[in-house]
Image (tube, helix red, strand yellow):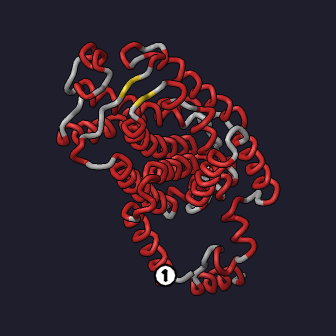
Amino acid sequence: MNGAGKTAWYLLLAVAALTLPTVPFLQPYLTQFAFLWVMILLALTWDIMGGQMGYNSFGNIVYFGVGMYTTAVVQRDLFFSVEEYAEVAGGVDAALNPLEFISSLALGMGLGAVLSVLIAAILGSGILGLRGHYFAICTLGLGIAAGEIASGMDYIGAGSGLVTSLLPDAFGERGRFFYYLFLVLAVITFLVLRRVYDSRFGLAINAIRDDEDKAEALGLHTTRYKTTAWCISAFFLALTGGAFGNMVIFIDPTDVAFAGPTFGVWMVLMAILGGKGTLWGPVIGATIFHVMQEVFWTFLFGWQRVALGLLIVIVVVFFPEGVVGWLRERWPHRFGEVVDEDARRLQVSLDSEP
């Protein structure tokens, strides 16, 4: 696809995304569409490590939960005492006005992102020396530990959870507000990652994925690059978690904030389903996964997890490279990597020189 075609495609997607909430028969499903953007964000942020760098992390859910709790605590502590807030359980008596809500939400998401980046830098410098299944198992333990720690902290509600601030009525319908919020986050994340993957940093983490020993032998500081990649993932995950806590209203430490068996696994499956290591793969995988999940939950209630399991098996068996990989193999001229003709000729001439 040429440059004009890509521009037209992006404009079409932008118009569709912006106008979708105005379609009358889709109004009841705005919250589900907001969830779709959350799924896309989860898949995109996981693919930085798992797809682009080849490090399969099951602990990214930690940063999702840290961002969620940090935002909720900031919104609470800026305007209420812990005891006062607990008495009304975040209800109408604890409602914020529009300015208070937006300012505290932005501040909380920002602080959550900074805190998550610091945690990622500390953890990354310590465990990113591990490789393969050792790293995966270690990160799995991080997610479980985070949930247990949060369950024992009374300041954030412990095992009873924490109710987040109510959305002021001035912002209108709840689903519409969070639809646009997560749409903006998803677009920013996508554009930033596209820029990152096209840079020297993107080439470095791809080199680590292809052969880390050779990358080190060539003088690449692999641990530094790996830690930076994890920090980028943590940053956007924390922003997503901070907004998500406000959308679902109630934060449970193990079922929402540090939900490893659900969100933590889903982000991996969605990236693989679409085609990990590609920019559009996580987006496509998240869309397919979320739509199929809603269909199964609606028409196959009681068997929905069985159906999802079968879907995963089918994808792994028949689409091992994901949807994008399958499309590139079947129609390489349309979905493959575009190589500039002048650059190709130059490379051929250089290779032919004695």
Percent of width and height locating residue 12: 45, 75
Viewer-proximal residue among 338 and 153? 153
Viewer-proximal residue among 23 and 109? 23
Q: Quick check: 190 above or below 297?
A: below
Q: Which residue is mark 1?
A: 3
What amino acid is labelled 1 in the image? Gly
Q: Quadrant of residue 86?
A: top left
The residue depicted at 25 percent of the width and 48 percent of the height is 171
The residue depicted at 40 percent of the width and 51 percent of the height is 182
The residue depicted at 28 percent of the width and 29 percent of the height is 74
Categorize mark 1 by other alpha carbons within 10 Å: few (<14), some (14-19), many (20+).
few
Please give left or right for residue 250 compared with residue 62 in the image.
left
Helix, strand or loop at disc 1? Answer: helix
Rendered-image quadrant of the C terminus = bottom right
Q: Quick check: 296 above or below 167?
A: below
Q: Residue furthest right?
A: 317
Percent of width and height locating residue 57: 62, 39
Rendered-image quadrant of the N terminus = bottom right
Viewer-proximal residue among 248 and 39? 248
Q: Quick check: 77 above or below 47?
A: above
Please give left or right for residue 292 compared with residue 252 in the image.
right
